[in-house]
Image (tube, rainbow, N blue to C red):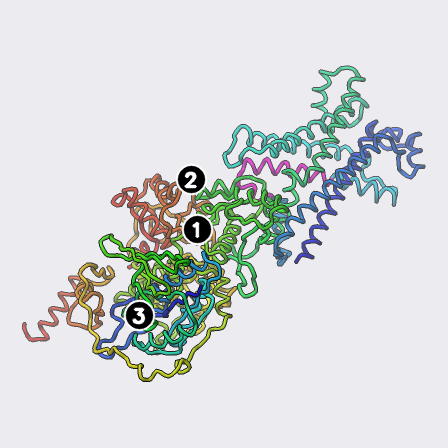
């Protein structure tokens, strides 16, 4: 993989050098030589007629002009700028390479597709419309100008010398001139929009970064000086094409009001030219050290992005690992370290992180930025531990693995995965984790469920229903295995009732299903999210063995955490059973008439998208469809729904933690739900049930605000 | 310094209905296999001492069948240095302690730590028997241990109940049995667990420990099992999904009764019940 990374980087380096050289040369051609005039410099008239003296000399010299002092100076500076970029980028590459190898380059076609959609299409960035539009304009401005200079390069060094053909001829040049003008204009507008957002609106998540502000300032100056220089040049030399550069000309006209004499204008022109060129060169040289690095690293990161299912944490190969997770900075993979440089500090992760919103310590943007600074300083302290260094203990454990940060990052950075890596190291290598988890781990290992209730309690929810236990040999093998899960079977009365409701619904619809009952072990999700990969794999392999033993082909469960881990994570460990989305299944039963709605609910509710069903597995519409179109609920949506749904706070082990800093996430969410002035909140996850039950009691709304699982509503409607 | 820690892999019964009263057999599904929590505390104490002293060796020893290896491996993962299993599956504390004492004397020791009792047989005797056989002083149920190795003494504390403690000074070598609250055992880190799987466990045959047929007398005998009286302090809260009759049955029996499938108790809605009652009355020729 290291070789692939080197090749990749080399290709992009080369692109960059070519780009820079072409800018230098294009500037050279049109600034040095066309600075004097337009086509009439070499020809008799603008339609490209006979060559005059200058033109003839040019042709005789093989289409090259004699070199001036100005040129030498400019080339020297450009050379330095290019070296600076090269060394800077190489240094960044070395920083990323100090990590473990690990940037997958599979499914190349999909990656190119993603690059086009997200870099050229700016798809994810546009989710925030003001920032997105400003950035879109700026990005396309540079891209179009870049295309223009490549065009010039092709003309000057390939087409013209080889075949004597001039692409930018008297007919085409005016359109080309207009094209450059408009490209510059959209860039200027984009930069102004971004500056307006940064300094007038001042959104909190953006922070105030001198580096970013300076980059914007420089950009605006570059655009303005470019326009002014072009406009003045056209004025001074009475170019025919003045009207084809409307922006440049209008700005220059403004300058002409102030500086009237021709000599003064000539001085202005030189100054503007040098300011524009120097700022441009400084910009280029500073790419590896400034905000502009993101143009390179973010694009690279988008290309190398993680294409695994969103819900799947990476498998840790315990047998062949010497260290586990990330204890120091170079335990992270190349990809993770590259991501640190891809971060543009836009703050969208921060804006949506429930831990930060509930005033805890965790801030995903800070995690990324602190790790980045640590990486840069790492040459001195490579073996410094991360927790207690750039990252604090509290931050790591406050993450609920809700996936908001990954969902909203426009350049596909994954702060949550870095947190999980650090958790793995803390748990597996150092046995350093919040005290509440110790008993959870022990219970999982000894009893197979987090609360240590024991396997024989797992069938209590069955009550007096007649359900096929697939471990009883005399039973026919059913088509589907209904998995109850730990919350649904062992330790929560409300959830046991929900599990029972699923069974009743299935029986009513005549679904052939069986249960494992006391042969279930915890799916392992809590262990894995907390970072105990060893325990997760132990549990998972046990479950997979059980599934194979009884020939389980299809599994359905009403717990999104179990659903997610079976669907997205068990296959990597050898599972080969199909995992069915229960709400899709129920909707199909309703559509096919196997379930008949006997009485519509007819009340107003709001619906909470569980993290592990929504963001993780893209199940947004099916539950809503069931609610609205089938069982007759009047659905009023909350403000934060679907991809921005606000976590109930149970994930990542946080359900078992006692005291937490800041506010309680579940209380914030209930407060948000109550604002919709409905009868209650509908959930689709047993974890959310537990959290919201406690929140509603705490808020004193036990009699005024209802909490009901979607399954229970369906049961109420069909039974 | 050598510390011997006696550990046991127990079959902990978590459901009170696990024992078949007629046969004495235990339902394996109502039991879980784990390292005795009191022994875990003993191991933790030994490791803490090892971490604070130079040149300290912790030897974990158990008497039992192959399942005992799990207790040893867990102890090793926590930080013990050696694992020894006496291949001996008798449950009589006098006999266990006899062979343990022989093994321990061969190894040599400065201190022996045991759990106060095991949470399956709940006998609490092996530690005391062992101390007698080794002819060393013993203090049971310690909740604090401070060593002063220079004067070969230890200062320990025990609960006296109602919040009171007593402090005792004891000469070393000695045997201590641990009570809950002595420490909070660590969760073993992964490298230790993996190393434990790869490290050799010394398995001792009791015959190799020398002839002791004259002293090998078991002193305990199980006469019978009986159901404990329902505890009054905790009320069994049955599943609220069950019918009222089943719930009552469960509450009265402390969780013992199984809801019967067929019985003379009828369940259902008012309509259904009146139908059934009518049928029954006609069937019994009452009306």
Q: Are marks 1 and 3 in contact (CB under 8 Å)?
A: no
Seen from the viewer's position, the closer of residues A447 and A350 is A447
The residue singled out by tag 1 in the image is A611
Q: Is residue B5 magenta?
A: no
Please state the chain letter of the residue tagged with numbered disc 3 in the rendered image.
Answer: B
- Counting residues from the N terminus, which is met first, the one under dot 1 or under dot 2? 2
The residue singled out by tag 2 in the image is A359
| Tag nearer the camera, 1 or 3 | 3
**Res. B71 in view:** yes
| Tag nearer the camera, 1 or 2 | 2
Seen from the viewer's position, the closer of residues B13 and B79 is B79
The residue singled out by tag 3 in the image is B30
Give the CA separation, mark 3 to mark 2.
44 Å
Secondary structure type for disc 1: loop
Q: Which residues are magenta?
A: A122-147
Q: Are marks 3 and 2 in contact (CB under 8 Å)?
A: no
Please state the chain letter of the residue tagged with numbered disc 2 in the rendered image.
Answer: A
Residue A124 point in image, percent of width and height: 56, 44
Residue B138 point in image, percent of width and height: 31, 65
Left or right position of A295 against A461: right
Left or right position of A610 against A347: left
């Amino acid at each position: 993989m290291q070789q692939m990374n080197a090749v990749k980087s080399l290709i992009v380096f080369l692109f960059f050098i070519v780009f820079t050289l072409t800018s230098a040369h294009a500037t050279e051609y049109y600034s040095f030589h066309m600075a004097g005039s337009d086509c009439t410099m070499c020809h008799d008239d603008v339609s490209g007629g006979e060559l005059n003296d200058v033109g003839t000399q040019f042709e005789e010299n093989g289409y090259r002009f004699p070199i001036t002092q100005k040129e030498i100076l400019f080339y020297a500076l450009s050379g330095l700028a290019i070296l600076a970029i090269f060394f800077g980028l190489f240094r960044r590459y070395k920083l990323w390479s100090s990590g473990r190898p690990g940037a997958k380059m599979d499914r190349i076609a999909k990656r190119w597709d993603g690059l086009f959609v997200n870099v050229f299409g700016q798809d994810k960035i546009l989710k925030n419309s003001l920032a997105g539009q400003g950035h879109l304009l700026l990005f396309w401005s540079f891209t179009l100008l870049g295309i223009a200079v490549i065009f010039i390069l092709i003309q000057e060094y390939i087409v013209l010398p080889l075949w004597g053909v001039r692409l930018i001829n008297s007919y085409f040049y005016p359109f080309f001139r207009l094209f450059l003008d408009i490209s510059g204009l959209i860039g200027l507008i984009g930069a102004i929009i971004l500056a307006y957002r940064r300094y007038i609106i001042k959104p909190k998540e953006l922070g105030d970064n001198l580096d970013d502000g300076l980059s914007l300032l420089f950009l605006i100056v570059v655009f303005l000086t470019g326009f002014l220089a072009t406009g003045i040049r056209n004025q001074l030399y009475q170019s025919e094409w003045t009207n084809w550069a409307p922006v440049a000309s209008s700005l220059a006209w403004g300058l002409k009001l102030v500086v009237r004499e021709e000599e003064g204008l000539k001085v202005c022109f030189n100054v503007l030219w040098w300011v524009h060129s120097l700022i441009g060169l400084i910009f280029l040289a500073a790419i590896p050290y400034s905000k502009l690095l993101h143009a390179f690293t973010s694009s690279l990161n988008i290309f190398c992005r993680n294409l695994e299912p969103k819900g799947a944490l990476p498998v840790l190969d315990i047998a062949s690992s010497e260290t586990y997770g990330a204890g120091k900075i170079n335990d992270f993979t190349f990809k993770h370290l590259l991501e640190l440089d891809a971060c543009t500090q836009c703050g969208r992760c921060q804006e949506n992180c429930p831990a930060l919103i509930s005033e805890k310590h965790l801030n995903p943007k800070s995690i990324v930025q602190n790790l980045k600074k640590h990486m840069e300083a790492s040459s001195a302290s490579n073996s410094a531990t991360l927790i207690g260094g750039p990252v604090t203990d509290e931050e790591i454990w406050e993450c609920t693995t809700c996936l908001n940060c990954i969902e909203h990052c426009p350049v596909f950075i994954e702060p949550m995965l870095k947190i999980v890596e650090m958790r793995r190291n803390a748990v597996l290598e150092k046995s350093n984790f919040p005290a509440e988890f110790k008993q959870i781990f022990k219970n999982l290992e000894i009893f197979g469920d987090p609360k240590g209730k024991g396997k024989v309690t797992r069938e209590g929810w069955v009550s007096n229903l007649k359900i096929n236990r697939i471990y009883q040999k005399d039973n026919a093998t059913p088509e589907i295995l209904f998995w109850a899960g730990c919350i649904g079977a062992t330790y929560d009365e409300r959830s046991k009732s929900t599990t029972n409701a699923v069974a009743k619904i299935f029986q009513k619809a005549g679904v052939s299903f069986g249960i494992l009952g006391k042969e279930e072990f915890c799916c392992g999700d809590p262990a894995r999210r907390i970072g105990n990969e060893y325990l997760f794999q132990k549990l998972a392999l046990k479950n997979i063995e059980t599934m194979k033993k009884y020939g389980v082909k299809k599994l359905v469960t009403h717990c999104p955490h179990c659903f997610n881990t079976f669907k997205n994570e068990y296959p990597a460990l050898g599972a080969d059973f199909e995992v069915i989305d229960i709400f899709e299944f129920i909707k199909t039963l309703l559509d096919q008439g196997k379930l008949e709605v006997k009485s519509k609910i007819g009340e107003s509710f709001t619906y909470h998208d569980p993290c592990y069903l929504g963001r993780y597995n893209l199940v947004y519409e099916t539950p809503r469809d069931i609610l609205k179109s089938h069982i007759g609920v009047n659905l009023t949506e909350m403000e934060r729904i679907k991809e921005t749904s606000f976590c109930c706070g149970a994930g990542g082990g946080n359900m078992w933690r006692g005291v937490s800093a800041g506010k309680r996430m579940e209380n914030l969410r209930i407060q948000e739900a109550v604002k919709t002035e409905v009868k209650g909140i509908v959930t689709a996850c047993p974890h959310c049930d537990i959290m919201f039950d406690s929140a509603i009691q705490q808020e004193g709304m036990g009699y005024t605000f209802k909490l009901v699982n979607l399954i229970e509503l369906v049961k109420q409607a069909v039974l | 310094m050598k510390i011997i820690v006696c550990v046991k892999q127990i079959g902990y019964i978590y459901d009170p209905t696990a024992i078949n009263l007629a046969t004495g057999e235990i339902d394996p599904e109502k039991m879980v296999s784990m390292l005795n929590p009191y022994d875990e505390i003993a191991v933790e104490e030994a490791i803490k001492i090892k971490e604070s002293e130079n040149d300290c060796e912790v030897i974990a020893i158990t008497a039992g069948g192959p399942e005992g290896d799990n207790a040893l491996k867990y102890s090793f993962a926590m930080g013990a240095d050696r694992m020894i299993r006496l291949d001996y599956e008798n449950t009589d504390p006098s006999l266990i302690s006899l062979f343990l004492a022989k093994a321990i004397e061969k190894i040599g020791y400065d201190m022996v730590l045991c759990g106060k009792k095991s949470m399956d047989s709940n006998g609490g005797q092996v530690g005391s028997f062992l101390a007698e056989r080794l002819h060393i002083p013993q203090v049971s149920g310690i909740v604090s241990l401070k060593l002063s190795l220079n004067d070969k003494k230890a200062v320990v504390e025990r609960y006296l109940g109602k919040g009171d403690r007593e402090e005792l000074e004891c000469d070393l070598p000695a045997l201590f049995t641990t009570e809950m609250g002595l420490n909070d055992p660590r969760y073993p880190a992964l490298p230790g667990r993996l190393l434990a799987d790869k490290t050799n466990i010394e398995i001792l045959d009791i015959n190799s420990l020398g002839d002791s047929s004259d002293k090998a007398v078991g002193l305990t005998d199980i006469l019978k099992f009986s159901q404990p009286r329902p505890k009054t302090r905790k009320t069994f809260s049955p599943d609220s999904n069950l019918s009222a009759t089943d719930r009552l049955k469960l509450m009265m029996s402390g969780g013992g009764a199984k809801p019967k499938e067929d019985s003379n108790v009828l369940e259902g809605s008012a309509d259904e019940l009146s139908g059934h009652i009518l049928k029954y009355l006609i069937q019994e020729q009452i009306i």
